[in-house]
Amino acid sequence: MATQLSLDAVCACSENVVARTIEGEVVLIPLIAGIGDEEDELYTLNETGQAIWQKLDGKKTLKEVAVSLAEVFDGPASELEADVLGFASELTKRGILVAK
């Protein structure tokens, strides 16, 4: 069973995934089989996902990422924290992010 992430977790891109910006969109490309969904080989992130992804540097906690996004996006801190935690949890479960 996967470890539950908390806002104190620090996440970074898996070494088995490459992120590229193509025509202004961030695309995540798994380098090995078994990452992500079998039917989805590429992931394209929406605006919020891109903003979160760009802050996941392997140094900041998820809470720090949410706080920095609060300066960009207008919304309750609790909602941003939930978005960041949900995003990181989903990508960690799929093997795209790793928790340090």
Image: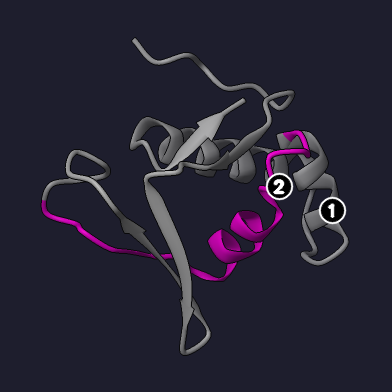
- Look at the image and give the residue range highlighted in magenta: 39-61
In front: 7, or 83? 7
User: Residue visible at 50% across and 32% down?
Assistant: 98
Image coordinates for residue 27, horizontal then vertical, percent:
41, 69
Quadrant the C terminus occupies: top right
Q: In terms of secondary structure, where does tag 1 sit?
A: helix
User: Residue visible at 12% across and 47% down?
Assistant: 38
User: Residue visible at 20% across and 58% down?
Assistant: 41
The kind of residue tagged 1 is Ser
Query: For residue 1, which quarter of the picture?
Result: top left
Which residue is tagged 2?
Answer: 80
Q: CA distance from mark 1 to mark 2?
A: 10 Å
Which residue is tagged 1?
Answer: 68
Asked if 57 appears above or below 34 in the picture, the reply is below
Asked if 15 appears above or below 19 in the picture, the reply is above
Of labels 1 and 2, the one closer to you: 1
